[in-house]
Image (cartoon, coloured by chain):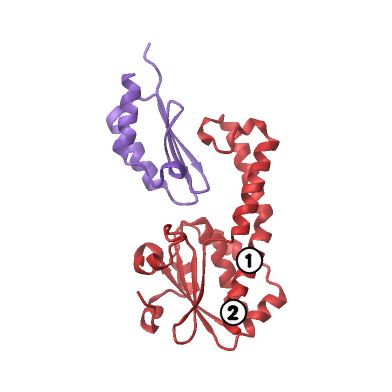
Amino acid sequence: MTAAHKVKITYCAECGYEPQTLDLAKALMLEFGARLSSIELIPWEGGTFEVSVDGQLVHSMARNGGFPDSATIQEAVRTRLSG
Amino acid sequence: MTIDRARFDQGLTYEAYKAQMTRNRERLEENEGRVELGKEDVAAFRSLPRPVRVVVLAEDWCGDVIANLPVLGRLARDSGKLDVRIFLRDQNDDIMQRYLNKGQFKSIPVFVFFDEGFRELGHWIERPASVTEIRAKRRKEIFAAHPEFGSPDAPVDALPEEVRVRLQDELAKMREGTTKFANAEVVRELREIATRVAA
């Protein structure tokens, strides 16, 4: 059975981070398609922008500063899928 | 970068700024209606010997702008002594670079006070430290009282959805409960700058 791989993007809704969230989600959808079981978008607050792949935090605005390069997130997903 | 009369006049008045808002005008106006100004606070601004010009950096999407700009707006309206012009942060980087938070961050709102000759009198950035402090403390208390919320430093996406919704409610209540204090602190800090101006 194929493992279910999930990506979660938590973004600050009051900050207007929707464009960055949607751009990243789109990049993941286009590259990985049905190989991801879900991409969850979580509206949050407080300047948050966090991305996790199968429960592993791969980007945090608070930790890493700024928005992630989508290529970095795509690479993290590729690594996970091949693992 | 210098602010002179010509540059100042390029800024939006408070009403014009509100008119061009596309996301959070309703929230900003709701906050404006909830600002409570003490008589002494208004009197302190009214008694300024001359009107003070205030350059503001803001953006519609920023929570601190939505919370704190209405306080300045109300002080301007009720005192009649603050001439406010608002500049969009992302279109006015030359001004932003001069008022970086801790010399590093493009935090907003920024309020810069000038006299009639456009000499800077003082500036204010983002929110009072006391507000950051009390909200961080209350946040820790919420997590301590609700073990199901996990660690305050852990990503929220690991929480089950129903727990996440409850956490969001608790944080919203906490913000609501500290708003009066926060507004009073903004007024106190702006009044300190104004008092310095009058001295």
Mark whose residue sits in front, 2 or 1: 2
The residue shown at (59%, 89%) is B49
Query: Which label number is shown at residue B123?
Result: none
Residue B182 in sight from this viewpoint = yes
The quarter of the image holding the N terminus of chain A is top left
Q: Residues within 10 Å of mark 2 (few under 14, many from 20)?
A: few
Q: Secondary structure at mark 2?
A: helix
Q: Report the side of B159 relative to A2 (left or right).
A: right
Residue B34 in sight from this viewpoint = no
Q: Residues within 10 Å of mark 1 (few under 14, many from 20)?
A: few
In the rendered picture, chain A carries what hue? purple
Kindly identify the amino acid type of the residue bearing the numbered disc 1.
Gly
User: Which of the 4 image quadrants contains residue A59?
Assistant: top left
The residue shown at (30%, 27%) is A32
Cα separation, mark 2 vs mark 1, equals: 28 Å
In x, y percent, where is residue A51?
A: 42, 36
* Between B35 and B117, the one nearer to me in the picture: B117
Kindly identify the amino acid type of the residue bearing the numbered disc 2.
Arg
Where does label 2 land, which residue? Answer: B196
Q: Secondary structure at mark 1?
A: helix
Which chain's residue wears label 1? Answer: B
* Name of the residue lying farthest toward the top: A1
Where does label 1 land, which residue? Answer: B33
* Name of the residue lying farthest toward the bottom: B49
Q: Is residue A80 above or below residue B37?
A: above
In the rendered picture, chain B carries what hue? red
Q: Report the side of B1 relative to A13 (left or right).
A: left
In x, y percent, where is residue B55?
A: 46, 74
The quarter of the image holding the C terminus of chain A is top left
